[in-house]
Amino acid sequence: MPKKVVKRKRAPKPKPAPEAAITAVPISVKVNGKTHSLTVEPRTLLVELIREKLDLTGTHVGCDTTYCGACTVLMNGAAVKSCTMFAVQADGAELLTVEGLEKDGQLHPIQKAFGDSYGLQCGYCTPGLMLSAFQLLSHNRQPSEKDIRKAIAGNTCRCTGYQNIFKAIQLAAQNVKGV
Amino acid sequence: MSSENNKKNWVGKPLPRKEEDRLLRGRGKFADDIKMREMLYLRFVRSPYAHARIVSIATSDAEAVAGVVCTLTGAEILPQVQPFIEIAPEPGGKIKDYPLAISKVRYQGEPVVAVIAESPGIADDAAELVQVEYEALDAVVDAEEALKDANILHEEAGTNRVWNGVFEYGDVEKAFSEAASVVHIDRLHFHRFSSTPLEANVVIAQWNPKDERIYYWCNNSFPSFAIQFLSAHLNVHIDRIRVETSDIGGSFGIKITSYPQMAVCALASKKAGGRPIKWVETRSEHNTSSAHGNERTFRDTRVALDKDGVITAIASRHIDDCGAYPRYEPLGCVIWSQVVPGVYRFKNTRIDFTQTVTNKCPVGPNRGYSRMQHLWFLERVVDICAHELGIPADEMRLRNYIRPEEFPYTTPNGCVYDSGNYPKMLQVAKGLIGWDEWKKKRAAARKQGRLIGMGIGTTLDSGTNNFGQSQIVNPGAPFSGNSQGANCKLDIYGEVVVAVGSCPQGQGHETTAAQVVADVLNIHPDLITVRTGFDTERNVHTGFSGTYASQFAVSGLSAVHGAAQKLKAEMKRLAAFVLETKEDDIEFGTGAQGPELRAKSTGKSINYWGLANIVNVNSAVLPVEMHDVTLNCRYIWRAPFKVPDKVKKYGNLTLTYASQLHIAVIEIDRDTFIPRILDYVAVDDCGTVINPAIVEGQVYGATAHGIGAALMESCVYDAVGNMLTSTFSDYTPITAVNMPKVKYGHIETPSPHSYSGAKGMGEGGAAPIHTISAALQDALFAEGIIVDDSFNNADSLFRAMVGKEIGQAAKLVTVERRP
Ligand code: FES
Ligand code: FES
């Protein structure tokens, strides 16, 4: 039955050096107002630092390749995709993750607006979306729908069809004071 | 106190969701958030080939890496397991499906070896060192090619055909002989896509040597189905498998078939001495090897119509492609027949249905499962006939729709459509979009040479399956009916706690269950705790428990309602005893001491704490005749189904039929061929609504999935079975910039089949796919193009319009008019 027989071997790749030999790099990051000094492997992704080392599991991974924005955090005020950055690149930076949005137990207006507008279903995309919204509202208090669409173009949501997210960000724009 | 006289109805209100707070604060608990002592990490080595024989596997280099605990191969697990249950009879039933490839690989991405290490990074590195020698075989990626059996995937089955059956109802030949016209459509094709939940599959498994039980923390969305497969596969008593889920980042059916990976993780844990194993699927693993939706080809379709354009018969041959292993299939070979005539009145039909394996990712029940393919087919048929016969699209539908006064409507194969009003939905949708104005605009635009089309899609979202339909595909299948379990109790201090056997992924079950219980007990929903996620140990699951197939509003909430009623009856009995009055003197409400029961005659009351106290910690005061009062009430709801007639393939297969009607206006750019939605409306009817905000959210979500699938999302394979859309950058799930603004409309035809009048909903019946195909057809008919595929991006429109690769109308469609 098989007509064409191609033999192919997966070429063995050189063995990686054992873990201990990979130089751990000391870094210091301020996350949600708290400074952490720690060492990471050079290959550690920023999202791994956040989720695995700092145990801030509100930041998610959806695509691993900079498309979906589930991993979005703010770095020095700019939204970045933490799945596509190394932890060492955040050395000295100030990060804001979803856990840092609330203040004294009170929801941030963006969080509140997402809740009030039914802007989430499974909630997996929501942290990233709220941080993209945070970045938008920090420089544009009266975003048009087009501005909103552009600002969250890099955040995929598979549940809501985005309609209520547009509403949520519009509502947040009205309620946010001094992002 | 508030009493039943000023009773509030919580059902029907857009109550804020109970789930929100934790999710907004980043405190949701998703499977990947769980970390355990001694946890190990698993990485799969997967096949780069679509079809190949495994010549040899060498794992020693991988095992030598510091931090690698062990590896696992197919040969190693073979003596420990049974092949997974096959639902098909022979020949499909002969297929042997294992979670790691044994001697052959049958799709790109099939797991071949598992590497288990102390960290995910080490497992990744070591997986690269596993050497597998393959002897490549010809791959077959096309369903019709596969059925020629020149290239057989599963030698033990002897054919690629999994299942075949003819569904024939009415008098088809008579209808054709009497037809005023017969339309012949050579080939239509529904493409392969996946709703790709944002959170991929995650499994944590521990085969605990201390108690010889297997523990799972995962995001499988139909755990009671998974444990039935795993128990038989692993030779483990089903009670020894515990599955817990918590928050789940979407499933849309795709996470139903993660049980093979669950099996490997358990076996790996066993080999690693009982340490917990975590496997987190990457996006490209998910896209190549979790599950895709069914692809279907419709061949030699003949449509009989009378002189008014009323369809009297449809005959066709359908070929379903289930990928390399059937898994949940061949259930899809019958599930489409829940909607044999769609929303139309024709009575005569013959569908010859065949399913085949191909060298592609196995399919799973993707949102709209199996019905959407058929409904798309019917909508294409109706639409093509309308264009060919020169009948306006809206008029064609009105002539063919089942009429409002005909409900409950029995379809030719014995399904009972509970309620509906399709003409009214059409009217609402036309009003919202401004149908007549758009017709004028379209006429003006066409004069300028612009390609603008208006399309209607009407669809059904059938919910709460009769699993007896499995006997239509396999007379020996031991399944029928449907059920769901729930428990409602007063805990020791009087807290109301509800558990239900569903497994939600964003559908807000904690909220809607609380709304139902709040109405039964006449208390505020905030006073009710609904357990998150699924847990076999809660003892509220039946063999059908999970979240799939548009049913929670019916099966889940009926179970919750039943349990709450039982609890209410017990509370009433106990309160009457304590308050020394008759049961009908007792009313439920909230007083100064929280929720309570009160004797109307005396004004004396007892609160929930008081009742719970007696039953749980003060039981000596209970007289013997009250000893059956537990305030801990389990209720199993059963759907009122019968076993269908397997020979005639006749019977009621689903309890409720929610419907949706969408209209789209689309323009195709003449230079770039990019289709752009200019206006869009979605109207739904899911009977009585429990929570309008949740329903509206589900409609938007399903609409986005459908628009994405129609215009952007396709699982593309090349001729040798390489998957070309393994990342999101290639698969391009719909984003905020592509998603049009959706105008939303709603009608309610209460279902006589559920206690509340609600119908299951959420899958949406893929209305946008039908609608967009219809709108594109309207734009392109004058160009001589027939829309014959469910997927239409700029590239395929370019090929249709310039290359004329598809849509050779003259050949694809022929019309025979009889004098
Ligand atoms: S996980 Fe980072 S963009 Fe998707
Ligand atoms: S709410 Fe589920 S992905 Fe956005």
Image (cartoon, rainbow, N blue to C red):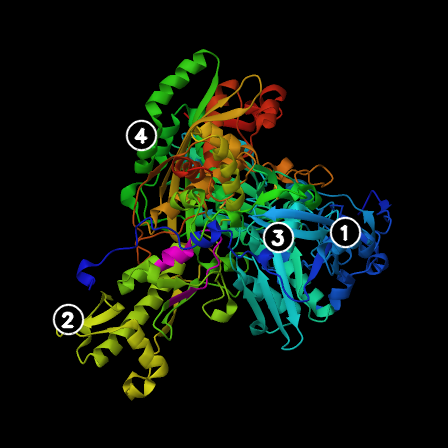
Q: Secondary structure at mark 3?
A: helix
Q: Chain of mark 2?
A: B
Confirm or deny contact between disc 3 and disc 4 (CB under 8 A): no
The image shows residue B176, relative to residue B445, as above or below, that is: below
Q: Which amino acid is tagged 1?
A: Ala
Task: Measure the alpha-carbon separation of dots 2 and 4.
Answer: 51 Å
Q: Nearer the viewer, residue B487 or B748?
A: B487
Q: Which amino acid is tagged 3?
A: Arg
Q: Do dots 4 and 1 share one subunit? A: no
> Residue sitting at 38 percent across and 45 percent down?
A116
Q: Which residue is mark 3?
A: A51
Q: Which residue is mark 2?
A: B600
Q: Which residue is mark 4?
A: B431
Confirm or deny contact between disc 1 and disc 2 (CB under 8 A): no
Q: Which circle, 3 or 4, is nearer the viewer?
A: 3
Q: Chain of mark 3?
A: A
Confirm or deny contact between disc 3 and disc 2 (CB under 8 A): no
Residue A143 in the image, given as x and y percentages of width and height:
44, 29
Q: Which residue is mark 1?
A: A24
Q: Nearer the viewer, residue B440 or B96?
A: B440
Q: Do dots 3 and 1 share one subunit? A: yes
Task: Measure the alpha-carbon separation of dots 3 and 2.
Answer: 56 Å
Residue B206 in the image, given as x and y percentages of width and height:
64, 68
